Image: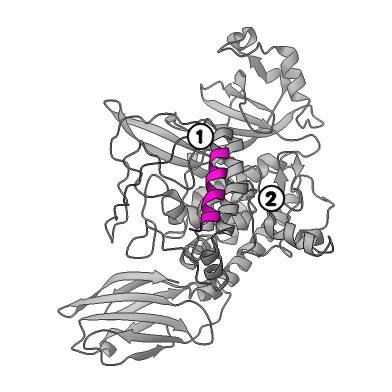
Amino acid sequence: MTPLRLNVVRFLALLLLVWSSGAHAGPKKLPPQPIDPKTATDHDGQPIPEPDFREKSLYGHQLREAIVEPLSQSFDVPDRILHLLGKGPRHEAVNVNAYDEVANSTWFTNRNHFRAMAPDSVRLGSARAEVIPTPPFTIKSRKQGGVNPGFTIKDKNGKRWVVKLDRPGYPQLGSGADVVVDRLFWAAGYNVSHDVACTFGRDELVIDDELKQGKDKAPPFGEADLDSLLLRGDRGADGRYSGQASLYLEGKPVGPIDMRLRRPDDPNDRFRHRNRRELRGLYVLCSWVGSWDTKDHQSLDTFIESVDSLGFVRHHLLDFGASIGAAAEGPRPPERGYEYTIDGKWMAFRLLTLGFVSEPWRRIPREVPIPSLGNFESQVWQPNQFKSLQPHGAFHEMTAGDAYWGAKLVASFSDAQIAAAIDAVGYEDPRVKPAMLQLLKERRDKIMRYWFAKVVPLDFFEVKSGQLRFRDLAVDRGIASPRAYSIHVEGPGIAQEHLSASETALDLAQLGPRATRAELEFEIEGLNAKSVIVNLHREGNAWTIERIRHG
């Protein structure tokens, strides 16, 4: 590191510490422990003592991600040169098993891309049943944090929910976007809260007596305060308010996820978070649904107690209201998802061109013909140019292999499954479902075409009846016709170094009778994409897969 860069980083780091006095110290440097190479489960839920709740300053986070980290990276001249040459310093995700998959863990559970879910299961979401708030509702507290007005309630059945109101004039805009993305992300494999779009009347709300009197040093909250809060929400012609209700998560909250670093007081948390594939590949899913406000504060760790005060930490993604065409204030501002809040690239372009530069988002129509859909499009948007509100620590580390994995998750969703996620909202405006479904389909297909042209989309390899069988995901999803495959082979005793196949099966007898190990590099003829490498090992007459890597 050059002296100039070192001094700048030290100064900004000191500024960050002053600004963010509530932020936790970084974890101790512990070498990541490799998981079992062929495991399908990470077993990271071993019993541990309850970790401390950790605060995370929103302003400190924004300063670090929007200013400190980008400046630090810009002063790293060798890394910048390597990045421009396409040979950046990013390395492979650390929690990938031998089959190039993410093992099931407290972070992620393989679902739809392994086994297609029934559309009705997608519609029901993480609760796996019809669970909705049942009136009357007792308001227990004001909603803490965030822009949307709201409160926490206990319903007739004793269930606790966080309620957020839709903005006036935009019924089901934020609540609908949240529920759709909640269902899609859960079906993809992530831990999420159970969110529902709901309506309620003023007469269904009762303020808790303790809240009226003020508790926990909070000012009293009375009927007039509630009426004032409800004025900030959407109210239909029938007098009912629309909003989103999020069921309380299982376990005890212990603070948000740090998308860069480990949680230091969780022995199960073995990998730096920016090097986890499920967080890196999340970029592709966020790009698909336009989830532009994706940051540490849109997450929560909870401690699940199991026995004798011991338990484990489960990691959740939360709050998807800033997705699809929505923002906290109403329709999504056109630039959201296309630029960072502080975007050095576009700031430089505007400076050098004296403002005569046409940003892509300026080509997006500003009118919002469907209030409950908001500002959402698929023509200007490009899969690899999506940007969250601030740079995201894990997104910055994403490799081609991580992006391919994320694209594989997106590609796994059928039209019927996407429609089921939309049905979970119960949109009152009949125009919303067909318009949103068409846009999500178009964006899904653009993601497949882009990333499946960057990395050879051959997957789900297995050895069966003396053949190495696989699937071509681009052909499966109908964006490519059947095609020819070229395979370069290396290994002791290999009979042929170059093989070809016109079907998704390779006769392993072609490797020769003396071959005991083989590395097969798969390419698609006519496609300039990063290859897939499959390592095989033979014991007796039986070949087994040792390792698969994409990109």
Quadrant that contains the C terminus:
bottom left
Q: Is residue 9 magenta?
A: yes
Residue 278: image location, x then y, percent = 46, 54
Picture disc at residue 434:
none
Q: What kind of residue is marked 2?
A: Ile
Above/below status of 535 relative to 122: below
Label 2 belongs to which residue?
A: 342
505 relative position to 388: left or right: left
Q: Which residue occupies 52% across, 76% down? A: 475
Please identify the quarter of the rendering in which residue 287 is found: bottom right
Q: Which residue occupies 52% across, 66% down? A: 78
Q: Which residues are magenta?
A: 1-16
- Of residues 9 and 213, the one drawn nearer to the viewer in this rendering: 9
69 relative position to 98: left or right: right
Number of other residues with Cα within 10 Å of mark 1, as a class: few under 14, some 14 to 19, many 20 or more: some
Q: What kind of residue is marked 1?
A: Ala
Q: Residue furthest front?
A: 3
Q: How was the colour assigned to the protein in this rendering?
A: one colour
Picture disc at residue 23:
1
Above/below status of 420 relative to 351: above
Is any atom of residue 318 visible in this view?
no
Residue 237: image location, x then y, percent = 82, 31
Above/below status of 175 relative to 333: above
Residue 165: image location, x then y, percent = 70, 32
Q: Secondary structure at mark 2?
A: loop
Number of other residues with Cα within 10 Å of mark 2, as a class: few under 14, some 14 to 19, many 20 or more: some
Q: Secondary structure at mark 1?
A: loop
Residue 58: image location, x then y, percent = 59, 36
